[in-house]
Amino acid sequence: MDFKEKVVLITGASSGIGRASAIKFAKKGAKIILVARNKIKLEKVQSDLNAFNTSTLVCECDVSDKSQVQLMSKKVLEKFGSVDILVNNAGFAIYDSVANLSIDEIESQMATNYFGMVYCIKNFLPSMIQKKSGHIVNVASVAASFGLPGIAPYCASKFAMLGFSEGLKHELKGTGVGITVVSPIMVRTNFFDHPSFENMPKYSPTSLSPETVANAVLKAANSPRLEIIVPSIVRGAVWIKETFPYLINPILGSAFRKQLNKKEQN
């Protein structure tokens, strides 16, 4: 896809994958709508995008709040009429056992990671269908395929994102609107700045840069595939887990449970 003059809306755009994706789309000549809760950080990203002589719009919005999403989408649709590419990237995790997490902490992850995506899709999909074009990119995680101790609610939100996307993809057949999920392994972003990750190693040697995942986001925006796993070699691990769960699940569970036990002992 030629992204020149395309309208691209990115949630969670103030840092990490969202910021990196905004820069890459801007380099391609797209018009960028930056959405996140922190207006000051968004304006910094907007300033960075000025180097590419493209149109940008800052929208301060908490996607977990459906009324805020409605107001944001109204502002965007009044200015642009529709969006060509919707990137649902906002998300976070709280690292702890389900026994220790509060109901509010569990619900907050689902509210941002899953329902934030749903609210954005519900507000922008009708205009996409009406003009018979557009693409939705949902940034999930390989945690959409692996249920892991310590991040069970986060995994649930990403499982939900992938399942919702698969069902919606079937519904969109023939409409001209596409949907693709980008599922990376660990990414070097402020995702791990949450206090719950304080005693954990920040990044593994195999962790990805935000720019690597942003490349996958651009690829996804013009892809017929349901899911793009980053790096692609991890797709083999997903296949093994789904084919031989009785072999893989005990190994993964044991490894991640050891880390969780260390946290609870501190």
Image (cartoon, grey):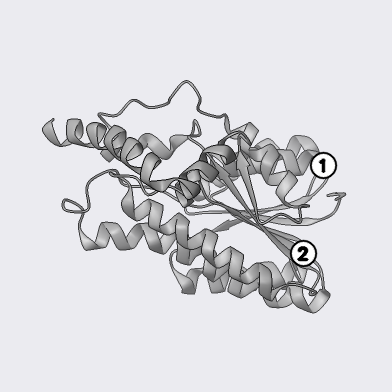
Instruction: Name the quadrant containing residue 230.
Output: top right
Q: Which residue has dot 2 on it?
A: 134
Q: Position of residue 150 (x, y in %)?
A: 28, 44
Q: Which mark is residue 28?
A: 1
Left or right: 221 in relation to 59 = right
Residue drawn 54% across and 45% down?
239
Task: Point out the residue furthest to the left here.
Answer: 265
Tally the numbered discs: 2
Q: Position of residue 203 (x, y in %)?
A: 42, 26
Q: Position of residue 79 (x, y in %)?
A: 74, 68
Q: Is residue 248 above or below residue 174?
A: above
Left or right: 87 in relation to 241 = right
Which is nearer the eye, 78 or 135?
135
Left or right: 170 in relation to 148 = right
Is residue 75 in view from this perspective?
no
* Three-letter amino acid code at the position of disc 2: Gly
Q: Residues within 10 Å of mark 1 (few under 14, many from 20)?
A: some
Assign a secondary structure to mark 2. strand
Residue drawn 37% across and 46% down?
246
Using the numbered discs, state the Cα–Cα distance from disc 2 to disc 1 in whole angstroms: 17 Å
Assign a secondary structure to mark 1. loop
* Three-letter amino acid code at the position of disc 1: Lys
| Image quarter of the C terminus | top left
